[in-house]
Amino acid sequence: MPTPIQAVIFDIGGVLIRTEDWSPRRRWEERLGLPERGLSAAVFDSEVALRAAIGQATDEDVWRYVGNRFALDPQQLGQLQMDFWSGDRLDVDLCQFLADLRPRFKTGILSNTWPHMPATNKRLFGFDAPVDAAVYSFNEGITKPSPHIYRVALERLGVRPEQAVFVDDFIENIDAAREVGMPAVWFRSREQAVTELQRYFGGNVSES
């Protein structure tokens, strides 16, 4: 018999909070001469951003780098920051689904993120990670898909790998979770993810 699931662990960006309107970023890409999704790459994939994700730089350092790269003055940089997040939306229904899993299941967050992003997510989207354990890469000094950070989440929740199902939008993070021994759901949409999770639960947890 399959091991009963005791915990559910969600990623945040691209899952609970997703970019639904790309037009604000696209306008900046046109202004800065960047290809489509080029602004996201400039913000998230820089060496400074990667250091911020392991707690060795700040959110301000990331945006300072972006401003310097594109020769933006402080007012322009502030507008870019506002516009950058303006197309993101909190999936309220999926958050409620996650909240409703308790107390039957332990719940967790496992996110690669910068030091101030939890506060930013709360300020912009009202998201405050109401879970049993929230594991952020900047606190741990390591990011997904490193096996160690999955084990940290499992330890905080007090479960074995086969007892926790993980949800993420990056296939490399899904593959890493499975290598650790965790069941995992590759997120493509709310409906698809909930349907796949239901199979692990035995199909008797309802989406709100």
Image (cartoon, rainbow, N blue to C red):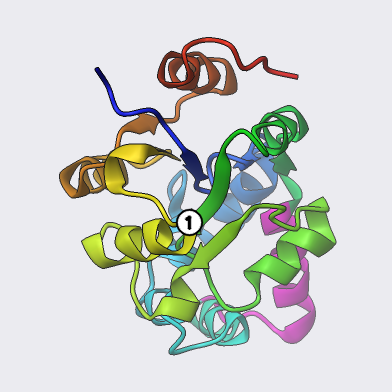
Q: Main secondary structure of the magenta part?
A: helix
What residue lies at 39% left-to-right and 63% top-to-bottom? 155
Quadrant assignment for the N terminus: top left
Q: Amino acid at mark 1?
A: Leu
Query: In percent of the image, x 73 and y 41: which residue is there?
Result: 90
| Residue occupied by mark 1 | 157
Q: Nearer the viewer, residue 131 or 19?
A: 131
Q: Magenta stretch containing residue 24, yes or no?
A: no
The residue lying at 71 percent from left, 44 percent from top is 87
Q: Check the image and name the residue furthest to the top.
A: 203
Evaluate whether residue 34 shows in this view. no
Span colored in magenta: 70-85
Label 1 environment density (alpha carbons within 10 Å; few <14, some 14–19, many ≥20): many
Callout 1 secondary element:
helix
- Left or right of 148: which side holds 129? right
Vertical comparison of 169 with 44: above or below: above
Q: Is residue 130 above or below residue 20?
A: below
Q: Is residue 186 above or below residue 126?
A: above
Residue drawn at the location 72% of the way across and 53% of the way down = 130
Instruction: Name the spot of residue 57 as percent of width and height, x first.
Output: 48, 88
User: Residue 79: within the magenta?
Assistant: yes
Image coordinates for residue 27, horizontal then vertical, percent: 65, 48
